[in-house]
Amino acid sequence: MGQSLVKNYIHIIFSTKHREPLIYQPVQNELYSYIGGICKEMECYPIKIGGYIEHIHILCMLSKKIALMKLLEEVKSHSSKWMKTKGTAMKNFYWQNGYGAFSVNPSEVDKVIAYIENQSEHHKKRTFQDEYRAFLKKYKVEYDERYIWD
């Protein structure tokens, strides 16, 4: 085969360190745009970025030229530094060490977009921890509760 053809939709989820509620307006939308810019620079084109006060969701196309781990390293390090420039309340802004990343069937992309768009409503009923555990269960990811939140 002479040509490499790739189309990988990835849904990435991670939270602030200790799930600190630091992602509020007006910085929230700016943060999503900033992260989208990082993704574009890495040819991991963002489809939808959103979240809630203590976590973020990124739906993007994973580039065939970059490892998922490298994308997350760049997104988290640059956006964390950027957040620290947004005022004294953000001087101790950090992301959690880990992340969740889940492949998305092309037929499910619209559902994931809607899910990310409705985070505020969704989190009136469910905590981030419960949401994340549900993703792990759905994707049959084994985990140890003692280590998942640090």
Image: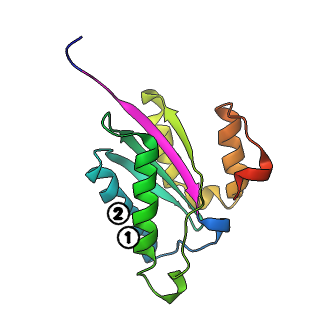
Q: How is the image coloured?
A: rainbow
Q: Is residue 37 left or right of residue 117?
A: left
Type of secondary structure dominating the magenta stretch? strand
Of residues 31 and 38, the one drawn nearer to the viewer in this rendering:
38
* Residue 14 sits inside the magenta stretch: yes
- Residue type at mark 2 is Ser
Q: Is residue 47 left or right of residue 91?
A: left
Q: Which mark is residue 129?
A: none
Residues at marks 1 and 2 touching, judged by CB atoms closer than 8 Å: yes
Say if 144 sits above or below 76 in the image: above
Percent of width and height locating residue 141: 68, 34
Query: What residue do we see at 51% from left, 82% from top?
Result: 91
**Magenta segment range?**
4-15
How packed mark 2 is, by other alpha carbons closer than 10 Å (few <14, some 14-19, many 20 or more), is: some
Q: Which mark is residue 30?
A: 1
Q: Which mark is residue 33?
A: 2
Find the distance from the CA under tag 1 to the CA under tag 2.
5 Å
Query: What residue do we see at 62% from left, 66% from top?
Result: 17
- Residue type at mark 1 is Glu
Percent of width and height locating residue 112: 50, 42
Q: Is residue 71 left or right of residue 120?
A: left
Which residue is situated farthest in the bottom direction here?
88
Percent of width and height locating residue 126: 71, 55
Quadrant hosting residue 133: top right
